[in-house]
Amino acid sequence: MSISLDEVRHVARLARLELEEAEIFSLQTELNALIGHFQDIQGIDVTNLSPTSHAVAMRNVWADDVPGATLPRDRALRNSALQRAGLFVVPQIIED
């Protein structure tokens, strides 16, 4: 199976791509090469392979939740544009 120039033009028109003739010829060559690769892949015998959900084995890595040193409030508020009662003051984003 190969892709014709008319099919390339049709797909380019659907994608609203304005391609020159040289680009259409180049795209046809590249698409036909891709189809060749897909046909090679389809020819691979996979009858003795078991299906997997991931290409690599995955596992969750959990770290212990151990509290560490905290930042003192005065240092945290040091670069704040606005602060009140020891808290950050930020613009309201939800209207009443």
Image (spheres, rainbow, N blue to C red):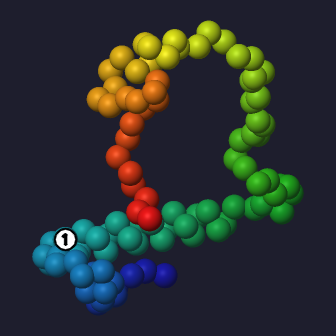
Identify the residue at image location x=57%, y=69%. 39
Identify the residue at image location x=16%, y=78%. 18
Question: In the rendering, at what x and y percent does residue 90 appear?
Answer: 38, 41
Residue 16 can be seen, yes or no: yes
Asked where in the image residue 47 lies, by quadrant, the reply is: bottom right
Residue 9 can be seen, yes or no: no
25 shown above or below 62 = below
Asked where in the image residue 46 lies, by quadrant, the reply is: bottom right
Question: In the rendering, at what x and y percent does residue 29 appear?
Answer: 32, 70
Question: In the rendering, at what x and y percent does residue 81 appear?
Answer: 29, 29
**Left or right: where 3 falls relative to 42:** left
> As drawn, which residue projects farthest toward the top?
69
Which one is in front, 15 or 21? 15
Q: Amino acid at mark 1?
A: Glu
Q: Which residue is mark 1?
A: 23
Question: In the rendering, at what x and y percent does residue 85 appear?
Answer: 45, 27
Identify the residue at image location x=13%, y=76%. 20
39 shown above or below 53 = below
Tally of marks = 1
Asked where in the image residue 65 lies, by quadrant, the reply is: top right
